[in-house]
Amino acid sequence: MLPRELLDILHVAERLKDTPRHCTTSKGRTESVAEHSWRVALTAYLIRDEFPELDMDKVIRMCLIHDLGECFTGDIPVFNKTNSDRAVEADLLDQWVRSLPAEVSADMSALYAEMDAQQTGEARLYKALDKLEAVIQHNESPISTWEPHEYELNRTYAHDAVAFSGWLTSLRAEILKDTDAKIEKESER
């Protein structure tokens, strides 16, 4: 890859630093998509020994690129995102990926196809971590930032995504304990 090609890619990806997500940080600041993607990738790195049968380098790559489409559309919370929104994002992302240097384009296209198909352990793990990170972040954010429907969503979201792994199911159970404790503490006020 030529240095200019790398810079062009990074300039597009930089948009995620300024793309706000629905959630806030523990101090109440709006989280960026880049921050979310970083922590999803960090989680994959930290749990790599729990999944020795998987290609964790691939999982980390999936985590790093999973929200690049939001460079073009912004973040739309899962509970508001329509199939039309998904199609527009996928089309814009595909156009951009096809414009990249051939080797990068081929690698990203293959990763996105695998991620979309959700047939491999790597793809299922990336998707589970993506969903779990959102719930973890909600637990860390001030409850005053939660919308009414998020109380139940934080209790129920991602259980289906972790069902393929006993370890992830245990992690989801721990996250649920944190959610319940946070809601209970709020109800005592």
Image (tube, helix red, strand yellow):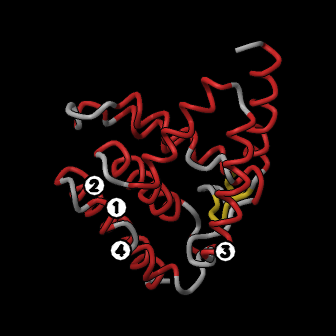
Q: Which residue is mark 3?
A: 84
Residue at coordinates 42% horizontally, 54% vertically from top-left?
127
Q: Amino acid at mark 4?
A: Asp
- The answer to whether the residues at label 2 and label 3 have Cβ atoms under 8 Å apart is no
2 vs 3, front mark: 3
Question: Mark 3: which secondary structure?
Answer: helix
Q: Is residue 109 left or right of residue 11?
A: left
Q: Amino acid at mark 3?
A: Ser
- Of label 4 and label 2, which has the lower sequence position? 2
Q: Residue at x 16, y 54 (%)?
A: 166
Tag 4 near tag 1, CB within 8 Å:
no
Which of the 4 image quarters holds residue 169?
Answer: bottom left
Indicate left or right for 101 with 137 as reference: right
Tag of residue 180: 4
Residue 127 vertical position relative to residue 6 in the rendered view, above or below: below
- Residue contact between numbered discs 4 and 2, judged by CB atoms under 8 Å: no
Comparing labels 4 and 1, the label whose residue is closer to the camera:
1
Q: Which residue is mark 2?
A: 171
Residue 134 rendering spot, x and y as whole percentages: 50, 60
Left or right: 69 as drawn, with respect to 156: right
Image coordinates for residue 88, horizontal then vertical, percent: 71, 64
